[in-house]
């Protein structure tokens, strides 16, 4: 009886995810369509796509993570409603431990990230959401690909230098060397390639700063296919529609979980007052008029870009006709309001942005709080994702072992 009740509860919750995703599908389908149209033609678009992406569990996701990646995952899910596309979204714990982590905190953060992915609107019935470390085939394929990857190719990758620079709190990667470089961090682009190829992904949503890693995945797939047997498609990129979200305090740098200044980022769990305080401290300038000019006015341009990205998904009162407006159009709109009200440009921009952020985060935070109170349900979703991912990963690795002579 308890099992039956539990199954009924889970079914109801799953249905709730589908209902929650429904209205958003109407407002975001155009965004997903626009982003997927930028995909490389390397993979055939007439066939069902296999889409893979991952996120590290460390730290609470911030607005940059949401606009740059997570919201796009929901868009892709909703856009695939009437297709046979397969979507895999992984919480990549093995990538997290390439840098030192507190074990108890990491354990908590893994669960929190699963809850966050569900809270933003991902539906376990329409995509596979899983922990990378629940599927042993990731590391098995990574070792095989390591054996096909030259040291020189990995040494030319830039991410390990950037990670070490961030850990040392220096801005210039030329200030770091490889004396503290672990093998795991050095080779983690190969693990990333294994993550993608294990599910025979045809498309990967990436930011512009991740294209280098996707190119490695394509190179390794090509090397493997030529040396052994054609097994892996060459994954194409889907550039996310929102460009990099920059730090509120240093708009020349990307918004980051690890930046020492907590006011540089807005977390998905920030209260309205915390959002208001952080936006108030954001860097702008003293110009009377607003204008989108990233090189000349990086602070104002960053806030305008965030506002445009947030408003593109809403049908809020006062935004009719602005659903697809870019930062330039929002600058014009706000300048008109400033002329009519006499407010200062910086204050009006920050007030408008604060309202948009709070409006966006409110439903996510409500759902996240509900999920936190049901750890049993989160465990059920973790097991569901594990089973779905394992079934595909095991088929792939059976083919790989046979083709390289290990079976």
Image (tube, rainbow, N blue to C red):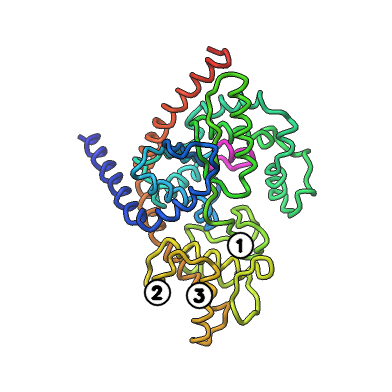
Point out residue 26 in the picture as x, y percentages from the top left corner: 35, 56
* Residue under the image location 52 percent in, 66 percent down: 326
In the image, residue 198 sits, relative to residue 60, either above or below, namely above
* Residue tagged 1: 264
Return the residue nearer the eye: 295 or 406: 295
Q: On the rendered structure, is 265 left or right of 19?
A: right
- First-in-chain label (3 vs 1): 1
Q: Secondary structure at mark 3?
A: helix
Q: Is residue 376 visible?
A: no
Point out residue 68 in the picture as x, y percentages from the top left corner: 53, 53
* Residue tagged 2: 318
Do the numbered discs 3 and 1 sit on residues whose CB atoms are within 8 Å?
Answer: no
In the image, residue 405 sits, relative to residue 319, either above or below, namely above
Q: Secondary structure at mark 2?
A: loop
Point out residue 280 in the picture as x, y percentages from the top left corner: 56, 72
Point out residue 108 in the picture as x, y percentages from the top left corner: 49, 44
- First-in-chain label (2 vs 1): 1
Q: Quadrant of the N terminus?
A: top left
Please tell me how crowded label 3 is: few (under 14), some (14-19), or many (20+) other residues with Cα within 10 Å. Answer: few
Return the residue nearer the eye: 251 or 257: 251
* Residue tagged 3: 351
């Amino acid at each position: 009886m308890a099992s039956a009740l539990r199954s009924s509860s889970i079914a109801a919750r799953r249905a709730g995810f589908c209902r929650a995703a429904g209205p958003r599908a109407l407002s975001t389908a155009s965004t997903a369509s626009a982003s997927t149209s930028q995909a490389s033609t390397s993979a055939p678009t007439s066939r069902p796509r296999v889409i893979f992406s991952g996120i590290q569990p460390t730290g609470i996701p911030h607005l940059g993570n949401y606009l740059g990646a997570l919201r796009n995952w929901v868009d892709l899910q909703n856009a695939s409603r009437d297709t046979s596309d397969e979507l895999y979204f992984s919480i990549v714990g093995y990538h997290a431990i390439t840098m030192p982590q507190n074990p108890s905190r990491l354990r908590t953060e893994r669960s929190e990230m699963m809850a966050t992915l569900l809270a933003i609107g991902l539906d376990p019935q329409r995509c596979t959401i899983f922990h990378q470390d629940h599927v042993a085939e990731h590391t098995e394929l990574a070792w095989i690909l390591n054996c096909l990857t030259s040291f020189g190719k990995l040494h030319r990758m830039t991410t390990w230098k950037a990670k070490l620079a961030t850990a040392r709190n220096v801005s210039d990667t030329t200030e770091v060397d490889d004396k503290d470089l672990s093998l795991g961090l050095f080779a983690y682009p190969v693990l990333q390639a294994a993550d993608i190829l294990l599910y025979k992904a045809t498309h990967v949503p990436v930011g512009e700063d991740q294209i280098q890693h996707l190119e490695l995945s394509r190179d390794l797939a090509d090397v493997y296919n030529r040396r052994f047997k054609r097994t892996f498609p060459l994954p194409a990129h889907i550039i996310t529609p929102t460009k990099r979200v920059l730090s509120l305090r240093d708009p020349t740098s990307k918004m980051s979980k690890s930046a020492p200044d907590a006011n540089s980022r807005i977390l998905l769990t920030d209260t309205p007052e915390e959002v208001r305080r952080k936006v108030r401290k954001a860097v702008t300038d003293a110009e009377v008029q607003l204008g989108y000019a990233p090189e000349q006015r990086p602070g104002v341009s960053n806030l305008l870009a965030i506002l445009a990205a947030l408003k593109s998904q809403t049908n809020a009162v006062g935004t009719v006709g602005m659903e697809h407006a870019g930062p330039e159009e929002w600058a014009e709109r706000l300048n008109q309001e400033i002329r009519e009200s006499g407010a200062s440009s910086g204050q009006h921009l920050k007030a408008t942005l604060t309202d948009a952020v709070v409006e966006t985060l409110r439903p996510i935070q409500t759902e996240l709080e509900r999920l936190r109170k049901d750890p049993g349900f989160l465990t059920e979703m973790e097991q569901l994702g594990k089973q779905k991912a394992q079934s595909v990963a095991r088929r792939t690795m059976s083919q790989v072992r046979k083709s390289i002579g290990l079976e």
